[in-house]
Amino acid sequence: MKKGFKLFDYSKPGKGVKKGETDYSFGGFFKLLKRKFFDLSKANFLWIVVNFPLFFGFVALSGNFDIPFSTPADPLYPIVDGVGKFVDTPAFTALWGVLGKNVEMTYAGPIARVLYGLTALAVLTFGPANAGMAYVIRNHARAEYVDMPADFFSAIKKNFWQALGLGIFDIVFSAIVVYDVIFFRIQAEAGFFYSMIYFFSIFLALVWVVMRFYMYQLLVTFKLSNFKIFKNSFIFAIIGMKHNIVGLIGVALTILINVLIYMYFLPLGGLLPFFITVALVTFISTYASYPNIKKIMIDPYYKSSDYVKKEPDEPSVFTDVG
């Protein structure tokens, strides 16, 4: 195009967003959260809808299908009951009054067990739902326009099979980490060796939580195998310590506040995860972790000679696959 008629120069960067919108500062977080709050709520709702098998679990946990039974309240009950067959004194009667009490408990009935089984189907929806959530929340964190619900389901469609495998591994490994922390906490009293394993399991759990900040973002942003996603997520979890700690504190505080609301104001605390908590936790972790991805993986590529010399029709290494 001749000089004088060149209305748009696509070789020059645009103005971008206004200063302060995506500076990833502490103050910028709250400004962006205020603007995007209702959009986050929409994403949270869609995540819950896609993970519909979780509803079966909530119904089962309500206790409406549990079967009640009576059981001794004290572990010494069998001993005292056996002594009672041979002793009948006032002292024993007083002891029986303390140790011979029963309490009412429940166990999952047939319907509840079926509901728990249906809940397990969430293993097939968890990864794809996280891919959709990661894509829209990442764009919100970058202060970009998001077309809801189209972008959410488009990200799921484009990444479905890889997200399915990533989600299954996520659930399985998370369960193993939680089990290890609980198991070695109990075993820690056995000696120094188990105490060290217990503290290592806590460290491993924290690293895994931070890795999850990155996994689904890398999935919807780059064309990487799941192995490379795990590898890069681990590297980011270690080298991006500053942002990761802030994000970890923010996520922990959000969950803690939700738990406290649940304890003291059950209706609201029980409903928050359905409307905002999941998306808010994802937004906090994304806002904290995306600058590391941008600095280490995105910006260097666009500044490299490979990108500058690349022909327009040549495929890019950096690809938004959401």
Image: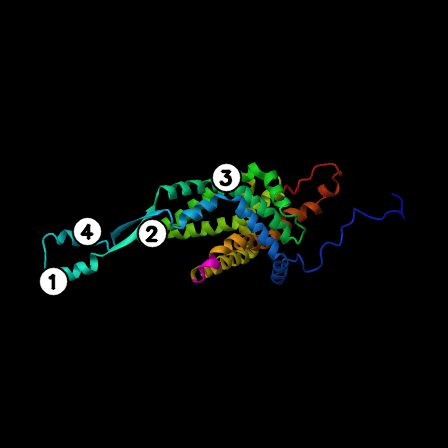
In the rendered image, which quarter is residue 18 located in? bottom right
Q: Which is in the foreground here, disc 4 or disc 1?
A: 1
Residue 264 position, x and y percent, is: 43, 63
Span colored in magenta = 264-269
Kind of element beneath mark 1: helix
Quadrant in which residue 160 is drawn: top right
Q: Rounded to the nearest whole Å, what is the CA distance between mark 4 and mark 3? A: 45 Å
| Residue corresponding to mark 2 | 186
Question: In front: mark 3 or mark 1?
Answer: 1
Residue denoted by label 4: 78
Label 1 neighbourhood size at 10 Å, few (<14), some (14-19), many (20+)?
Answer: few
> In terms of secondary structure, where does tag 2 sit?
helix
Residue under pointer 1 = 90
- The secondary structure type at the circle numbered 4 is helix
Residue at left 19%, top 51%? 78
Q: Position of residue 115 (x, y in %)?
A: 42, 42
Task: Tell me which label, 4 or 3, sits earlier in the chain.
Answer: 4
